[in-house]
């Protein structure tokens, strides 16, 4: 949880999920040690207008726990050399959402914003699983599968516009 934003640049792939309890041992000046631990952590979350920007330069990204940017916080999830798999909800209060993969975007969970725009790009396919939705609360939505197919479930832009561009089929 962060108020000011979360910025992660990863070299070889990343899974956003849940950790167990994280424990370390603190060394004290008097040569004693003390255990220090944090409760389990999960997902990525910002408050206020904190953005979430997660980029993997040479590997895939898997989202298996909630990613939510509060208020006007924007969300960027980009796998520059791999797939982007969404197994958990990705949302922004009213900021913009960009999801990008050099290969496939596999959307197994909802993507939402309440007034921002949504851009989903893939080098090959965009696959929205049955029952998922991409919604923008009146912002525009664009899905682009440069060299592949777009398999749609529900795309809801309210009063906004929707653009679907596929290298092969929609």
Image: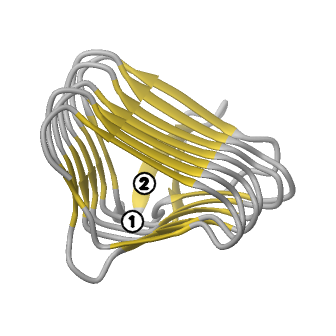
Please give the label number shown on residue 17: none
- Residue at 47% x, 60% y: name it: 43
**Residue 46 percent across, percent down from the top left:** 71, 55
**Residue 34 percent across, percent down from the top left:** 54, 51
- Residue at 76% x, 49% y: name it: 73
Q: Quadrant of residue 121?
A: top left
Locate residue 140 relative to residue 101 in the image: left or right: right
Q: Quadrant of residue 105?
A: top left
Q: Nearer the viewer, mark 1 or mark 2?
A: 1
Front-most of residues 93 and 138: 138
**Residue under pointer 1:** 65
- Dot 2: within a 10 Å radius of its alpha carbon, few (fewer than 14), some, or many (20 or more) residues? few
The residue lying furthest to the bottom in this view is 131
Locate residue 24 relative to residue 7 in the image: left or right: left
- Dot 1: within a 10 Å radius of its alpha carbon, few (fewer than 14), some, or many (20 or more) residues? some
- Residue at 55% x, 33% y: name it: 31
- Residue at 60% x, 66% y: name it: 157
Check if mark 1's residue and mark 2's residue have beta carbons within 8 Å: no
The residue lying furthest to the right in this view is 48
- SS assignment at label 1: loop
Front-most of residues 39 and 13: 13
Q: Quadrant of residue 26?
A: top right
Q: CA distance from mark 1 to mark 2?
A: 21 Å
Whether residue 160 is situated above or below residue 5 in the rendered picture: below
- SS assignment at label 2: strand
Whether residue 24 is situated above or below residue 60 in the rendered picture: below
Whether residue 49 is situated above or below residue 38 in the rendered picture: above
**Residue 98 percent across, percent down from the top left:** 53, 40
**Residue 141 percent across, percent down from the top left:** 55, 52
Please give the label number shown on residue 23: 2
């Amino acid at each position: 949880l962060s108020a000011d934003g979360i910025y992660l640049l990863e070299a070889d792939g990343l899974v956003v999920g849940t950790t167990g309890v994280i424990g370390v041992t603190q060394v004290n000046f008097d040569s004693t040690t003390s255990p220090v631990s944090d409760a389990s952590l999960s997902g990525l979350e910002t408050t206020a207008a904190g953005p979430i920007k997660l980029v993997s330069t040479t590997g895939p990204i898997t989202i298996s726990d909630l990613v939510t940017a509060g208020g006007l916080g924007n969300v960027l999830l980009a796998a520059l050399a791999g797939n982007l798999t969404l197994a958990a909800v990705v949302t922004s209060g009213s900021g913009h959402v960009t999801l990008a993969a050099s290969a496939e975007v596999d959307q197994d969970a909802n993507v939402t914003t309440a007034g921002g725009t949504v851009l989903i790009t893939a080098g090959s396919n965009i696959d929205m699983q049955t029952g998922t939705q991409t919604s923008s609360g009146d912002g525009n939505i664009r899905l682009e599968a440069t060299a592949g197919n777009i398999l749609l479930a529900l795309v809801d832009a309210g009063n906004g516009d929707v653009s679907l561009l596929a290298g092969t089929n929609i």
